[in-house]
Image (spheres, helix red, strand yellow):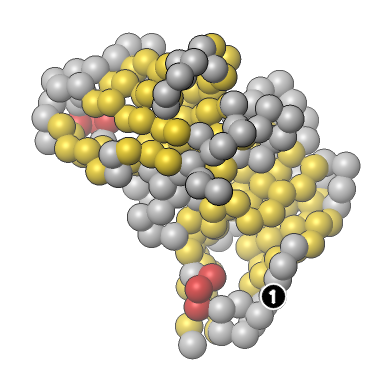
Amino acid sequence: GESVGLHLPTLSVQEGDNSIINCAYSNSASDYFIWYKQESGKGPQFIIDIRSNMDKRQGQRVTVLLNKTVKHLSLQIAATQPGDSAVYFCAEKGKAGTALIFGKGTTLSVSS
Amino acid sequence: NAGVMQNPRHLVRRRGQEARLRCSPMKGHSHVYWYRQLPEEGLKFMVYLQKENIIDESGMPKERFSAEFPKEGPSILRIQQVVRGDSAAYFCASSRADQETQYFGPGTRLLVL
């Protein structure tokens, strides 16, 4: 069935390091992918998205990479800051529906 | 520009009572989505609505749950005869008709005693 998963439930990095959060998806028909950041007690906050006709997209300090061959999505955060500490979710959207399908999330902890 | 608004932020109900969760989409957004999040888990889709229409309710339990998005006013997610298993965070998201990006509200945390 359709599912989106993350490779690691937790990731700990030092302030200033680059962070890479990975996500594997199972539905090869998905054509839209999105990363959200969720801080404790808050709603998911949009970070960056990418369509299936692209393999890379950059934002401010963040880059999303899409490898359709192996159905893999990653979020790279440059110069990670303590304020980046949160749970990060990837989500996919299949062509047939309109709902986002979320993975379980990776908790990013940034230490000073 | 105000984001997606949800109220109440916290709601406590006893078993058997009704819960009403409200969501006001972002300005210019005509599509509303409801998701449920259990502790330590990702969000699960429940229902997708446009003004006065339910487009997709495939993720919503058949009994006790209903949703509406009237012509005027916020979208409402209604849970009748709540049970302890309904305790969760309920998030609303909205999007523009011509875009796929969904923006989320702060959520309503429902606790059923």
Q: Is residue B57 visible?
A: no
| Chain letter for mark 1 | A
Q: Position of residue B90 (x, y in %)?
A: 38, 37
**Quadrant showing the N terminus of chain A:** top right
Q: Quadrant of residue B38?
A: top left
Q: Is residue B67 visible?
A: yes
Image position of B20 (left or right of A78): left
Q: Position of residue A89 (x, y in %)?
A: 56, 51
Q: Which residue is mark 1?
A: A78
Question: Residue lying farthest right?
Answer: A53
Label 1: how many Cα within 10 Å (few below 14, some 14–19, many 20+) = some
Q: Is residue A51 above or below residue B18?
A: below
Which residue is pictured at 44% across the width and 60% down the height? A39
Which residue is pictured at 72% across the width and 67% down the height? A60
Residue in the foreground of this view, choosing between B1 and B15: B1
Question: Residue lying farthest bottom?
Answer: A112
Which residue is pictured at 55% across the width and 84% down the height? A14
Residue in the foreground of this view, choosing between B73 and B39: B73
Asked which secondary structure carries label 1, the reply is: loop
Number of numbered discs: 1
Q: Position of residue A94 (x, y in %)?
A: 70, 29
Q: Position of residue A4 (x, y in %)?
A: 61, 42
Q: Is residue A21 above or below residue B2?
A: below
Which residue is pictured at 59% across the width and 26% down the height? B30
Residue in the foreground of this view, choosing between B16 and B32: B32
Tell me the amino acid under the disc marked 1: Ala
Image position of A78 (left or right of A38): right
Q: Is residue A33 above or below residue A10?
A: above
